[in-house]
Image (cartoon, helix red, strand yellow):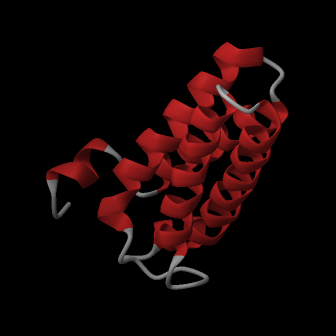
Amino acid sequence: MSSTSEALAPPGVPLLVAGAGAALVLVRLAGTPGTVIGVVAILVGTMLSATHADRPAAISGWWNLLAAGAAMVLAGTLLGLVAETPGGLITALGAILVAVAVALGIPACGSR
């Protein structure tokens, strides 16, 4: 292991956390508390996966896509407090971006 962050979280774990958060946000089965937990999971997964952003994957910019999706989810959630429809749309699009980034970043997890 080359760093403390790798010892704390293997490369796939942060992506799985972000992916689970995206699923919570998109499905909305748990209501508002589930959405809040999903947004937090997306943000935590994005921050923890930053140390693995340089790993090879299906596309080279998977982490940039993940970060953009996380930013959209956060912005959409905040906008949803004022304007529900546009906020929900931006949140859903951001969660879809996160899910796509997770799918593209997962193959990099086995790479060294």
Front residue of 19 and 81: 81
Q: Residue at x 40, y 56 (%)?
A: 49
Q: Residue at x 66, y 28 (%)?
A: 82
Dividing the image into 4 quarters, which one contains the N terminus? bottom left
**Residue 103: image x %, image y %?**
67, 64
Dividing the image into 4 quarters, which one contains the C terminus? bottom left
Q: Residue at x 58, y 84 (%)?
A: 59
Q: Is residue 100 left or right of residue 5?
A: right
Numbered-mark total: 0
Front residue of 70 and 9: 70
Q: Quadrant of residue 18?
A: top right
Image: 66 above or below 107? above
Q: Is residue 84 visible?
A: yes
Q: Quadrant of residue 78?
A: top right
**Residue 30: image x %, image y %?**
77, 16
For this orientation, the residue located farthest to the left is 3
Image: 16 above or below 38? below
Image: 30 above or below 82? above
Q: Residue at x 46, y 45 (%)?
A: 45
Q: Quadrant of residue 99?
A: bottom right
**Residue 58: image x %, image y %?**
61, 82
